[in-house]
Image: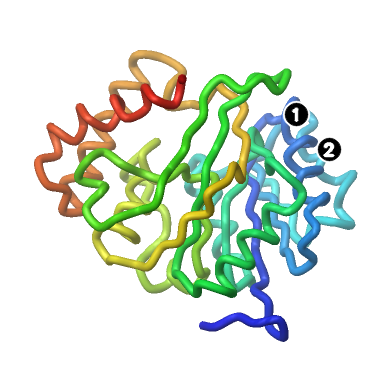
């Protein structure tokens, strides 16, 4: 699939939400402000009870699809969004995330158009609700085998050609909170899909993720990481499991 000035990629952006009243408006507004004009915006809500959907409905003229119904969790909701997506390229922007600038999707589209990769990713900042940056995730250029050294790109910056989901599968619910890590492992490490790194901050993420919310959840997340590694041909998963969190230390400096 080749893109050009005549046929720029249509980008499907999927936001999944559940009781995200405090953050979803910032998320939605960051999509609406994008300068790129070939966007399909989809919101998949898990039947929120806090007014999240009412906030989304305020912007329904800018949102192609809004679904609010019970689901089996965040990755089930992502899969629902992917099933509805009609774009050439698809990415996930969760309700706690927002685009770092108004030209992010322009940059993503240019990368697909000029480089023709299967996947585009970039950098991410973790921020407090007041906007203060607390961590800086600088991905770096991918080289074959880097997942064996604990590397991974930030999932909120991960955009891929939509047809890849049909070819290589969706988010697997058997990996719990590591489903995004497992999918990127499967696409990039196991199936050797081509990637292109955009060296700039694409997304800002408000701190307070589910997988880091308690020691119990963190242990479960490690178990799911290990399972993903074993099932996607990572060399020496126990060692990689120890290296992976150590790589994050540099994000705090």
Q: Residue at x 27, y 37 (%)?
A: 225
Q: Is residue 227 left or right of residue 238?
A: right
x and y, in percent, of residue 32 in the image: 82, 51
Is residue 206 positioned above or below 159 on the image?
above
Coloring scheme used:
rainbow
As rendered, which of 143 and 30 lies closer to the eye? 143
Q: Quadrant of residue 105?
A: bottom right
x and y, in percent, of residue 68 in the image: 69, 46
Q: Is residue 57 left or right of residue 218?
A: right
Is residue 2 positioned above or below 45 on the image?
below
As rendered, which of 30 and 84 lies closer to the eye? 30
The CA span between labels 2 and 1 is: 7 Å
Q: Residue furthest bottom?
A: 6
As rendered, which of 193 and 70 lies closer to the eye? 193
Can you see residue 97? yes
Category of crowding for the residue at label 2, using alpha-carbon neighbours closer than 10 angstroms: few (below 14), some (14–19), many (at least 20): some
x and y, in percent, of residue 157 in the image: 54, 48
Task: Name the element at disc 2.
Answer: helix
Q: Residue at x 33, y 59 (%)?
A: 188
Q: Which mark is residue 109?
A: none
Q: Is residue 243 left or right of residue 51?
A: left
Category of crowding for the residue at label 1, using alpha-carbon neighbours closer than 10 angstroms: few (below 14), some (14–19), many (at least 20): many
Can you see residue 49? no
Residue position for label 1: 21
Give the total of numbered labels: 2
Q: Earlier in the sequence, mark 2 or mark 1?
A: 1
Q: Are marks 2 and 1 in contact (CB under 8 Å)?
A: yes
Q: Is residue 20 left or right of residue 162?
A: right
Q: Residue at x 36, y 22 (%)?
A: 249
Task: Name the element at disc 1.
Answer: loop
x and y, in percent, of residue 38 in the image: 75, 69
Q: Which mark is residue 55?
A: 2
């Amino acid at each position: 699939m080749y893109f050009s000035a005549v046929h720029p990629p249509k980008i499907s952006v999927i936001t999944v939400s559940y009781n995200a009243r405090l953050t979803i408006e910032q998320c939605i507004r960051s999509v609406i402000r994008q300068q790129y004009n070939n966007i399909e915006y989809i919101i998949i809500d898990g039947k929120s009870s806090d007014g999240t959907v009412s906030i989304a409905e305020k912007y329904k003229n800018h949102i192609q699809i809004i679904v609010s119904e019970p689901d089996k969790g965040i990755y089930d909701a992502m899969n629902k969004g992917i099933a509805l997506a009609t774009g050439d390229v698809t990415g996930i922007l969760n309700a706690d995330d927002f685009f770092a600038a108004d030209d992010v999707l322009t940059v993503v589209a240019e990368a697909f158009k000029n480089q023709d990769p299967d996947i585009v990713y970039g950098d991410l900042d973790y921020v407090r609700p007041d906007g203060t940056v607390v961590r800086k995730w600088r991905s770096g250029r991918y080289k074959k085998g880097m997942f064996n050294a604990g590397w991974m790109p930030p999932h909120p910056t991960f955009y891929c050609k939509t047809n890849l989901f049909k070819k290589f599968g969706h988010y697997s619910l058997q990996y719990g909170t590591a489903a995004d890590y497992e999918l990127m492992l499967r696409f990039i490490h196991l199936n050797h899909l081509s990637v292109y790194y955009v060296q700039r901050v694409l997304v800002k993420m408000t701190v307070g993720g589910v997988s880091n919310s308690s020691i119990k959840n963190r242990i479960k997340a490690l178990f799911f990481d290990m399972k993903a590694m074993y099932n996607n041909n990572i060399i020496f998963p126990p060692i990689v499991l120890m290296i992976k969190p150590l790589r994050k230390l540099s994000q705090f400096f």
